[in-house]
Image: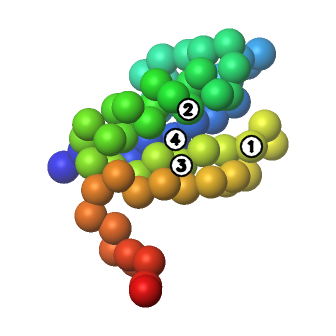
Amino acid sequence: MAKDIHVVPHDDSWAWRREGANRVSGTADTQAEAERTARRAAQRDGVELIVHRPNGRIRDKDSHGRDPYPPKG
């Protein structure tokens, strides 16, 4: 089963990594660029994309697979 992908601050840039991984999957100069690349991987693998703020707190989540809490209505 594929693991969720996090977009996180990394030194003076941004990175994305699989949940539980010790190493980052890749880096980008901007958060937007890292998010675009990570989103493609999340869509391909059907996993959740979790975007963090510069302080490390979660800013946004986007499910690209089976959402355990789908929207109602």
Question: In terms of sequence position, does the residue under pointer 4 or pointer 1 come before the other?
Answer: 4
Residue that badge 4 annotates: 6
Question: In terms of sequence position, does the residue under pointer 3 or pointer 2 come before the other?
Answer: 2
Q: Nearer the viewer, mark 2 or mark 4?
A: 2
Question: Gap in Å between the C-alphas at discs 3 and 4?
Answer: 5 Å
User: Residue at 62% across / 54% down in the picture?
Assistant: 60
* Residue 20 in sight: no
Q: Amino acid at mark 4?
A: His
Question: Gap in Å between the C-alphas at discs 4 and 1?
Answer: 11 Å
Question: In terms of sequence position, does the residue under pointer 3 or pointer 4 come before the other?
Answer: 4
Residue that badge 3 annotates: 50
Question: In terms of sequence position, does the residue under pointer 2 or pointer 1 come before the other?
Answer: 2
Query: Dot 1: few (<14), some (14–19), or many (≥20) neighbours within 10 Å?
Result: few
Residue that badge 1 annotates: 53
State left or right for residue 3 relative to residue 52. Answer: left
Residue that badge 2 annotates: 35
Looking at the image, the residue that sits furthest to the left is 1
Question: Gap in Å between the C-alphas at discs 2 and 4?
Answer: 9 Å
Query: Dot 2: few (<14), some (14–19), or many (≥20) neighbours within 10 Å?
Result: many
* Label 2 SS: helix
Q: How is the image coloured?
A: rainbow
Q: Amino acid at mark 2?
A: Glu
* Label 3 SS: strand
User: Residue at 69% across / 20% down in the picture?
Assistant: 30
Question: In terms of sequence position, does the residue under pointer 2 or pointer 4 come before the other?
Answer: 4
Question: Gap in Å between the C-alphas at discs 1 and 3?
Answer: 10 Å
* Label 4 SS: strand
Question: Gap in Å between the C-alphas at discs 2 and 1?
Answer: 12 Å
User: Cβ–Cβ below 8 Å for labels 4 and 1?
Assistant: no
